[in-house]
Amino acid sequence: MRLDSRLLLLFVVVSLVFARLISASSRSAVHAVLIEKLEAPALVRTGEIKASMDVGLRSGDEAELLGEYLRGCLGSYGASYAAALDKDGRVVLIERVSGLGPAPGSFAETGATEHGGRPVHQLIVTSSRGALLLGWDLSEALRTEQDIAVKIFLYTSLAGGLALVLLFFLMRDLVRRFDKMSGDILDQLRDGVFVIDGEGKIRTVNPALLKMLGYGERELIGRPASVLLAAGAGGALLAPVENAELRLRRQDGGFVPVLLSVSLLREGAGAPSGIICAVRDVTELKRKDAELKEREALLRSADKLSAVGRLAAGIAHEINNPLGSILGFAQAAAARLKPSEALSMPLRAIEEEALRCRSLVKSLLSFSREGRDALEELELAPVIEGTLGVIEAQARVRGVPIAREFAAGSRALGDRGQIQQIVMNLCTNALDAMPDGGTLTVRCGVRGANVYIEVQDEGPGIPEDIRGRIFDPFFTTKDVGQGTGLGLSLVHEIVVRHRGTVSASDAPGGGTLMRVELPAAS
């Protein structure tokens, strides 16, 4: 039986009980009024009755006088019988309209009694020599009382029932409105909400939760709450909690990070009958938090690069002048000697090392942003192709073929030499990562408002623990004398100067994928 049916039945029972009480009370009141009306004439003439009884009982011609007086009482007081009583309360003489009344010589008492199976009411008025007994037949009066009581019961039941039924429908309408308002509130909430009963089964869900997890309502209602929880997370629903981090299982098997708040549902002061859970999807919040941390890391890296850049610029300027002198004197001396002379080889070695130092100084100056960028609108494919022509010989010696995947229309606003420097440094690192051979793949194309350059190798990849340091100045994993640690730092500096981004990730199938994105030329 549904709740509203039980409530309606309760209202009907209450209505009947209420009507029964009113009917009984009304019948008692009617009976009291009737008795009062019967007794009133006699009670008003009590003094006359006493005097008459004294005279009648004193007379020697007692029976005739009493009989005449008693017959007069039948008409005067509308009684069914009238009797004279002696001082002991025994019936001396009785006159009757019907066969009712006590027998002569019997004792009489006042109030309600029965004679011949019929209800009667008796009133005794005492005098100095005896008493007058009046009795009234109540059969017809009681039937009238019963009819009145039945009518009162029916009318009261009908009126009370109608009022209670009307109250029931008004209450049901209020409950339905409240349920609809509650449902509308749940539907409008941006947070997911689900209600679990005392058996641990889901009883209510709102649209936000269904959208968040990708379920249909029928897929969740009546199922255990454990279907939504990651393994071992059931304890989170055992007690009230606020903003606890949790993962909920999506319909596709994935998980959604949420903040969970749990409240107990109680009926009055009794034990909890269930729990209500509110969850907030924090996927976007976590993504923004990760972005913020990444930007903080980039800011710290930029500060570090700026400091190193100023240091590099000072060192480069201090080295450049004496280096020029060393290189000039070495070249001049070597030019005066024949290749076969003993000093020729050391001088040529000094020249080569000086040239290598000059290249390093040039890199330091580029890293420290010395000089001005010559920006122009460039088609990336020919710029990259020109750079690959320089390193192709080195790649061929190492047995590394170069695959080209160039998309037409990849145009950027940048410095030709610096973009070539980016490609050169990335390709050099890729070749160094493949000492046992492999394929070097270079791509360029357009993605949205940006153009991209990708350099992919088939080497061992970059370990996760050092991936965040590869753009730091002077950081290198190569052996001493094999690298300066400025190659990727210089790439990062040039890309930032061009308002772009550079990233490293694992290539599909193994190796490393270096990706540079630059704003496309408008």
Image (cartoon, rainbow, N blue to C red):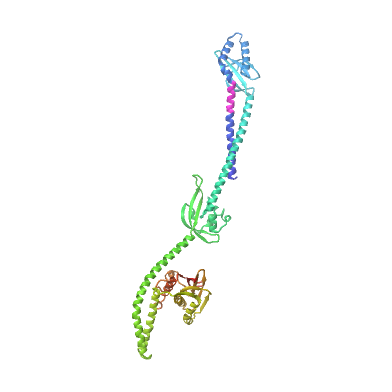
Left/right placement of residue 271 relative to residue 347 reads: right
Does 466 sit above or below residue 265?
below
Residue at position x 59%, y 27% in the image? 30
Q: Nearer the viewer, residue 47 or 126?
A: 47
Residue 469 position, x and y percent, is 42, 70
Q: Quadrant of the N terminus?
A: top right
Q: Is the residue 236 above or below the residue 49 in the image? A: below
Q: Is residue 443 something that shows in the picture?
A: yes
Magenta region = 27-38
Q: Nearer the viewer, residue 438 or 415?
A: 415
Residue at screen point 53% across, 52% down: 186
Picture layout, residue 236 above or below residue 36 = below
| Farthest-out residue, right | 98
Q: Residue at x 51, y 51 (%)?
A: 276
Question: Is residue 18 magenta-colored?
Answer: no
Q: What x and y, as percent, mark residue 354?
A: 37, 82
* 85 lies above or below 367: above
Q: Position of residue 471 (x, y in %)?
A: 42, 71
Count of picture labels: 0
Q: Is 69 in front, or is 198?
A: 69
Q: Is residue 32 magenta?
A: yes
Residue 457 seen from this side? no
Q: In this rendered view, identify the residue nearer to me: 438 or 89.
A: 438
Q: Position of residue 184 (x, y in %)?
A: 54, 51
Give the main secondary structure, helix, strand or loop, of the magenta stretch.
helix
